Image (cartoon, rainbow, N blue to C red):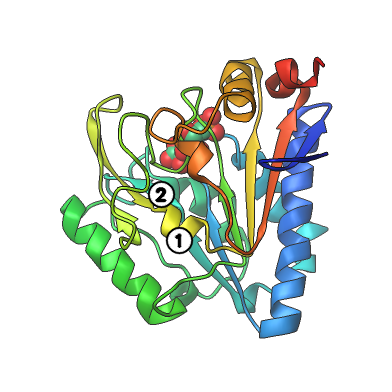
Amino acid sequence: MKTARGTLDVFDSAEIVANAVADLFVERAGEAIGERGQFCVALAGGTTPKAAYALLADEPRSGQVDWRNVAVYFGDERCVAPDDEQSNYRMAQQMLLRHVPVPAENVFRMRGEDEPAAAARDYANVLRSTLGPAPRFDLILLGMGADAHTASLFPGEDPHRDEDALVRAPYVEKAGAYRLTLTPAVINNARCIAIATEGPSKAAALQSVFREPEDATMRPIQSVAPRDGELVWLVDREAAGGLLQH
Ligand code: 6PG
């Protein structure tokens, strides 16, 4: 359904959410490659997207994407080595990238093993050199934490604080570690942003995001508002819980 915060699609189960994310990926890839010759996508980390990535890595969907013309980026990364079990890149490699023929030179990972501020600067340069001064993704996949964070934009810091930055390296108290993350300047320039979230642990956050006034410092995912694009929330009934009660 249409809401002030984008389209909210509620599905009966997490499995159906994963299928919906995979179908959206296939659809947007076909559109982008058909219209512009390439599909530029930023992948989400965490656990929610794993099922969707596994579906994309398998028939029939793996055969429905022209992987040679897909460019893969990341919405955020933990400041760890790429082979660390915490790495979002490692998870995407395991669940999707090693199963499909995306050219290695088309995979742009955030270098979590480098000094955070330098890694953020480097990734911003990668974005500029490959996508131009105002990077515009065809699709950005995001998740949501139970504290209404998204990517690595966590409560307590204004996500809009340095509007010119494309990539940021915040120290995340909750994680006791640095992270790398796209900023709202990049996220909100996307043609399509898809937020997938599921499970009862996200219900309170989702309700506050949709029902409480805008406070992006408290609820960073409220900073997600595409300037000239589409925002789709793909959630299961457990996460949508309170939202469905009128
Ligand atoms: C990360 C993600 C993060 C994630 C949320 C939800 O690096 O962990 O980018 O923003 O999307 O924390 O995580 P789950 O999908 O594991 O609930």
Label 2 packing within 10 angstroms: few (<14), some (14-19), many (20+): many
Which residue is rendered at x = 39% and y = 61% of the image? 109
Q: Which residue is mark 2?
A: 76
Answer yes or no: is residue 216 visible. yes
Residue 28 x/y as whole percent: 73, 65
Residue 84 x/y as whole percent: 33, 42
Query: Of the residues under marks 1 and 2, which one precedes in the sequence?
Result: 2
C-alpha span from label 1 to label 2: 12 Å
The label nearer to you, 1 versus 2, is: 1
From the image, which quarter does the C terminus lie in? top right
Element assignment for label 1: helix
Label 1 packing within 10 angstroms: few (<14), some (14-19), many (20+): many
Q: Amino acid at mark 2?
A: Asp
Q: How many marks?
A: 2
Q: Amino acid at mark 1?
A: Val
Q: Which residue is mark 1?
A: 186
- State which quadrant residue 49 falls in: top right
- State which quadrant residue 171 falls in: top left
Which residue is rendered at x = 48% and y = 45% of the image? 91
> Which residue is at the front of the view, 45 or 224?
224
In the rendered image of this protein, does residue 22 appear above or below residue 204? below
Q: Is 108 left, or right, of 36 in this rendering?
A: left
